[in-house]
Image (spheres, rainbow, N blue to C red):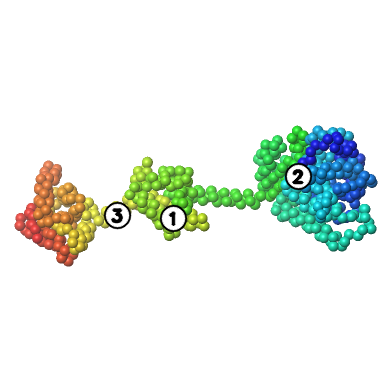
Amino acid sequence: MTVPSPTPEAVPSPCEAAFAGVQEQGAEPGEPLRSHGHAISLAAGHATADPLLDGLLRLVAAHFGVAAACVVPGEAPAVRGLDAGVDEALYEALRVLTRRAHECGAREPLIVPDISADPAWRNLLAHASKPLRFVAAWPLYGAQGEHVGSLCLIDPAPRELDAAGCASLGDFARVAAALAARPTLATSRDIEVPAVDRLALHAELEALREHERLLAHAIAGSGTGIWDRDVVTGEIRYSVGWKAILGYAEHELTSRIEDSYLRLHPDDRDYVKAAMQAHFEGRTPTYEVEHRIRCKDGRYKWICSRGKVMSRDVHGRALRMIGTTTDITSMREMAERLRESAALITNLTNEVPGLVFQRRQLPGGRAFFSYASAGISEIYELTPEQAAHDTACIDALIHPDDLDAWRASFEHSAANLTPWHLEFRVLLPQQGLRWRQGDARPQRFADGTTVWHGFITDATERKRIEAELKEFASTDGLTRLANRRHFMARVEAQLAQARRGGAGAAVMMCDLDHFKSINDRWGHAVGDDVLRHFAEILRTQVRAGDMAGRIGGEEFAILLAPADLEGAHTVARRIQERFAEQPLAVVGDVVALTVSIGITLMNATDMSAETALTRSDFALYRAKKGGRNRIECA
C-alpha cells in the first residue's frame, strides 16, 4: 500500500527529524548515506547481536540495492542506546509508520516512493539536513497471526517497488518474521533458542543465499551485465559481468556517462542518445535499444540494452535508471547470415525463368500464394501481392476450357499428396493466349494445411514446336494434306468403326492426268504448283469430317464418311469439274488439267485399310485405261 500523508496531530514530533539520522557506517555527521547493504536490526528498541537476523538484513539490503534494511518490532518501549547508525528519531518514525499500517489492517507492503513529493511529508523533513526519500515496510506476523514487527527498506533517493520486488520482499519477510518473533540475545540472554529452530532458520537463510547465488550465475551465464545510472550526477556503475562483455577487468572502466558514449559506434550514437532521452522525458515506458559498442580490443560488438527510470523528482525529472546489457553479437551475425541466405534464395528464384511459388490451401479451402517470385509478372501478369490473398485472380486468367482441369488437379494432389503436374492455357491481357506448365510437390501440416512448392513455366513455344512436329509427322510437306501414314491411320480407324456397326464410308483414289508431260514441258517447279493447286481444290470440296491426303507422287486419296457410292460419285464429279475449270496459269500460257478417279465403299469385312485402298486403286486403273478424266467404281 502507499502510505497516506501524515497530519501533524497523527505523528509525534520525533518524526520531524527521523530521516536525518541515518548515515553511512563510519561517516561523518551530516554526510549523505550513499553506500548500499547496511543491516540495521532493531528488537525491542535496541540493535540486536543475532547473527542470523543481521545476515538476513545485509542480504535484503544488497538484493534491493537500498541504503539500509531493518526490522522494527511491533510493540517497543522508549528507544535508548540505539547504534548501527540509527538514531531515536529514525526508529520512532519507522515504528509510527509501521504501527499505523498495522492498525489499518494492511498485510501488504507500505511504500513511500518519495517522501518529499507530499507537502505533509516535507513538513516533517523541515529540520533534516540530509533527509531520506524512500521507505518500504512489510508487516511481519507470527504463527498465531500476531503482529511481531515490520521489515523495512530505506534509501536517500526516491524509487519504486514493482510487483517482482514486492514478491521478493514478501519472501524475505517470512524469514524475518520467524527471527523477529523469538527472543533475541540482546533481551533474553538466558533463554536458549531450540536447536531445531536455529537449524530451520539457518537452512531457510542459506536457501535465500543460494537463490541469490543462482540468480547471479544465471545473469553471468546469459551474457548479461547490469548498470546503474545516476542521471543527475552523470555517474554510471557497471557490474563485473557488464565489463566482461567488453573484455575489461573490474577496475578498467570509468563511471562517467560521457566515457560510455565514446564507446558507442559513431553511426549508433545519436540513435542511442535519442532513445535514452525519450525515456527520460516519459515518452516511452522503457528504454530498449540494439547498437554496437567498442570492446577493449577495438572490435565492435552488438548489444541489447534495456532499462527503466526507477525514481523521479517532484517535477518528473529522471533521477536514477537501472538496466541490463546483453551481448547479441552471435544473434545478429546469425540474423545477418539468414538475411543473406534469404536474399540469395530470392535473387535465385527471381532469376529462374518462370514462376517459383509456394501455394497454401487452408482446411476450409481458401488458397493463396504465400510466396511468388518476380516471374509471376511474366507468367500471369500479376504481382506477388495480388496472389498473396487468394488465387481468384489467377483462376480468372485460366482458359475456360482448362479451368476445371486446373482446379481438379490441385484437389487430386491435395487428396492423395501426389505431385502436381498440369499443362494449361491462360488468357492474359497483354500476351493473349499462352501455354503454361506447372509442377509442384505437396506437403501436409498438422493443422490440415496443404503446401505446394514448385514452379510454373511458359510452355507456349514448346507447344508450338510440338504442334509443328505433329503436323510434320502427319502432313505432306508440299501440299499440307495428310501424308500416306496419317491417311491410312484414319482409314483404319474408320474401318474399326464400321465393324462396330458404324455408318458406311467411301474411299476415292485420284491421279492427275499427263502429270509427267507437265513436268517435262514446264519443269518440276510448275509440277509442284499443279500438285498444290489440286490440293487446294480438294480442301474446298471435302466436308469437315472428311479427309484428303497425298499418297505419293501425283496420287491423292479421299475418305468420305459417311457416304455411299452415289454421294461419293457426286463429290468426284465436282472435283473433276473444278479442276478442269481452273487451269494453272504460267508465264504466257495455261496448263490444262484433268484428273482420273476410282471409288469404292469400305466394308466391315475388309481385312485392313489397304484392302479398301487397293480396290479403289483398281477402279482408278480402269478410269485411266478407259481414256483418263473418268470416274470408275469398284
In this view, the residue in front, 41 or 181, is 181
2 and 1 marks in contact (CB < 8 Å): no
Mark 2: which secondary structure? loop
State the image coordinates of residue 595 (x, y, percent, origin top left): 11, 52
Q: Residue at x 86, y 33 (%)?
A: 126
State the image coordinates of residue 631 (x, y, percent, origin top left): 8, 55
Q: Residue at x 21, y 56 (%)?
A: 483
The residue type indicated by label 2 comes to: Leu
Report, in whole angstroms, how far the alpha carbon at label 1 lies from the one at label 3: 28 Å
Disc 1: which residue: 440
* Image quadrant in which the N terminus is located: top right
* Image quadrant in which the C terminus is located: bottom left
**Residue 556, picture quadrant:** bottom left
State the image coordinates of residue 534 (x, y, percent, origin top left): 15, 50
Mark 3: which secondary structure? helix
| Badge 2: residue crowd in 10 Å (few <14, some 14–19, many ≥20) | some
Q: Earlier in the sequence, mark 2 or mark 1?
A: 2
Q: Which mark is residue 469?
A: 3
State the image coordinates of residue 213 (x, y, percent, origin top left): 77, 56
Between tags 2 and 3, which lies in front? Answer: 2
In this view, the residue in front, 261 or 634, is 634
- Camera sees residue 442: yes
* 336 on left or right of 378: right
Asked if residue 272 is positioned above or below residue 183 in the image, the reply reads above
The residue type indicated by label 1 comes to: Ala
Between tags 2 and 1, which lies in front? Answer: 2
The residue type indicated by label 3 comes to: Leu
Q: Earlier in the sequence, mark 2 or mark 3?
A: 2
